[in-house]
Image: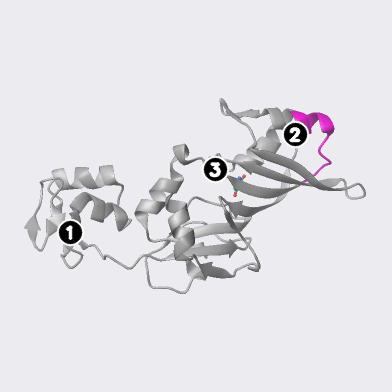
Amino acid sequence: MERLQKVIASSGYASRRKAEELIKAGKVYVNDQKVTQLGTKVNPSDDIRIDGQHLTLEKKEYYLLNKPRGIISSAHDDKGRKTVVDLIETNARIYPIGRLDYDTTGLIILTNDGTLAQKLAHPSQKVEKTYIAKLDKILTTEDFYQLKKGVVIEGKKVIPTKLKIKSKDKQKQTSLITISIVEGRNHIVKKIFNQLGYDVKKLKRESYDFLTLGNLKSGEYRELSLEEIKKLYR
Ligand code: URA
């Protein structure tokens, strides 16, 4: 038996707080009975209905995808474009944890485990993500050290946890930079380089916490192991 608000949150329907609000507002029915008492215990076999919609307590699934370019990082797209969820063969209602831009490639996790998704998305978790950015110029030594010290983006300083010049192409005047950050703001890597006067021509996420792409080719995915899921929960 588990607390109703926890079951709703782990189904991915809503956050724990939102679930509590829904219960208090009398929107939640368990086996056709309205429940307004927070902390009511339910069984996995109980039928939970919110605003007329039945909650499916699906088995939890976890995937690591190497996202190709030109794919949306959300569960649905209003314009009907292909999303990361379309690339995974499952009937579970999975969604990505965090976002990668339409033109960004690389590692993204998808799950229907709302509890894990909320935990990892929370800024206090400080999940380190590593990206490889191809810049439209060669990063100067001055800017490299400026970046190491941190760059203020929309009033908040971002200090990379790791920063390395991977390579420079003198002929094409481009450079490849490895940058790790714990920030989760949208377009953050592009904004960091834009701030210093560089354009990010290509961006790839190579790792998320301890997870790496390994041998996965663009568009390929694999399930996370139980060990990996436990580690993400820690
Ligand atoms: N930072 C960006 O600018 N884009 C991404 O997709 C991820 C991080």
Per the image, is 143 magenta?
A: yes
Mark 3 burial class by Cα count in 10 Å: few <14, some 14-19, many 20+: few
In the picture, residue 159 is in which quadrant?
top right
The quarter in which the N terminus is drawn is: bottom left
Q: Which residue is mark 2?
A: 197
Left or right: where 54 falls relative to 78: left
Residue farthest to the left, as pictured = 33
Q: CA distance from mark 3 to mark 1?
A: 38 Å
Secondary structure beneath disc 1?
loop
Q: Which residue is mark 1?
A: 1
Q: Is mark 3 within 8 Å of ligand 1?
A: yes
Mark 3 and mark 2 in contact? Answer it, CB < 8 Å: no
Secondary structure beneath disc 3?
loop
Left or right: where 73 falls relative to 115: right
Amino acid found under the numbered disc labelled 1 = Met
At x 54%, y 57%, the residue is 108
Residue 76, percent from left and from top: 43, 60
Q: Which residues are magenta?
A: 135-145
Can see residue 77?
no
Going from the N terminus, do you reach mark 3 or mark 1 first?
1
Can see residue 46?
yes
